[in-house]
Amino acid sequence: MPLVNMKDMLDHAYAHGYAVGAFDLVGLDFLEAIITGAERSRAPVILGLAESHFDHFDFELAMPAVEAAARRARVPVAIHLDHGANLESAVRAIRLGANGVMVDASHLRIGDNVAITRGVVEMAHGCGVCVEGELGYVPGAAGEEAERHPGPVQYTTVAEARAYAERTGVDCLAVSIGTLHGRRADRPRLDWARLKELNAALGLPLVIHGGSGLTDDQYRKLVTLGVAKINYYTALADAAGEAIRAAAKAGGRSYTALLGGVREAIAAEVERCLRVWGAAGRAAEVSDRCRPWLNVEHVVAYNAPRLDEAGVRALMAEGQRALATIPGVRGVSVGSVADAPARYRHCWLIRLAAPEAIERYRRHPAQIAFVERLFRPAAADRLSADYRIADRHSETAALPLPRVPSTEAVAS
């Protein structure tokens, strides 16, 4: 099953009364185990990458592995930036393959939170990407989570949530009703009345951060009151730690011996959660109801008879620099013909995150400036087309997209 549109996934969960697990990963063991747990339970799943965890892995190196694992999974998968620091973090995550983003401005005044989130929504929706907002503040419990999420709890109010959703246009909303990031010694007391009112007022998928440490009954009640996404990390990390300690106690000394049971421990916890949250067995229907997440390749073939070889190289270098900055552009490749008789001697391959990103790309000032100033004068002889990039794990073909009136050259 391919990567799927995250908004479609969450809308399906909200409409059908279950919650998708958004499991944060900090390494390859976590990645493989999360997919394994989801496949065992035949459940949709979200792979979460929290910017607060980037000290533990290289985001640029990790994302190709995350995307590859998602595309070969046998269940629907989405990839989500969790607790992004700013708009630039969201742009970067989309470029690297995320189809859901969350920039955390919940610690700021509501006016600032609205302004920042609205900017993220405007950018991400132009790329077809789902956006999660957060209103109210979910702090961290003792230890590292307290350092990552400092400060006291601030509960989400219904009036502010309604205004926030209307003014930002978020696709789902993380709310604060008494959970904490990290582990806690006491049993959390959740504000059920508040959650019920929020669900009635908003009518969109709700998200719980700090999902570890609740009882099964609490999880089930969250789902009945509109929670469609539960963020989960601490319990996975604890399961991994217990597996390592057990291996050490059994005499394990080498790196591989100590980590031998980690994947199974994480996978078992993921599977348990997805069954409790009602997501188990939903993979086929989610796959049928959700749009596949397919990149678009904007292909331009051209001749530049007025430019010598050095001029063509300079044109290509400037285009790569300028066009790669546009939100929704995942990469810009350039090349020249390897077969002398070819009709066109040079090409651009511009990968976009999704079909929705095409129009944003066409209208972006950086693209228009490059076309008008450099490309159009040099490349009057050209052709172009947009292609959806088929996922080899799906049956979707790479078909040309409909043409849309637009500026010329690299944009058309």
Image: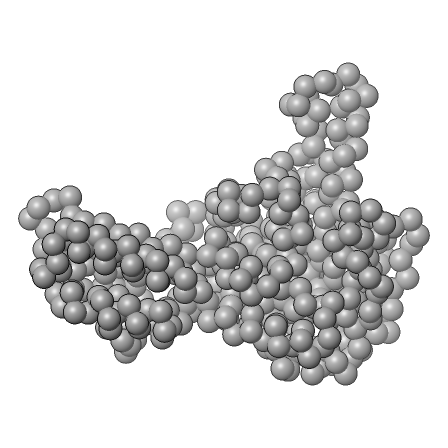
Quadrant occupied by the C terminus: bottom left
**Residue 282 in sight:** no
Task: Classify 279 as above or below 272.
Answer: below
**Residue 193 in sight:** yes
Write down the quadrant of residue 307 in the picture: bottom left
Residue 387 image position (x, y, % from top left): 31, 60
Task: Classify 32 as above or below 221.
Answer: above
Coloring scheme of the render? one colour
* Residue at the right extreme, as displayed: 186
Residue 73 image position (x, y, % from top left): 53, 45
Q: Is residue 370 left or right of residue 145?
A: left
Residue at image location 48% in from the left, 63% down from the top: 291
**Nearer to the camera, 15 or 142:** 142
**Nearer to the camera, 173 or 149:** 149
Write down the quadrant of residue 251 in the picture: top right
Residue at image location 30% in from the left, 52% down from the top: 333
Q: Is residue 302 left or right of residue 50?
A: left
Residue 109 image position (x, y, % from top left): 73, 75
Task: Classify 343 as above or below 227.
Answer: above
- Total marks in image: 0
Residue at image location 51% in from the left, 46% down from the top: 60
Residue at image location 64% in from the left, 52% down from the top: 50
Q: Is residue 306 left or right of residue 132?
A: left
Residue 158 image position (x, y, % from top left): 78, 79
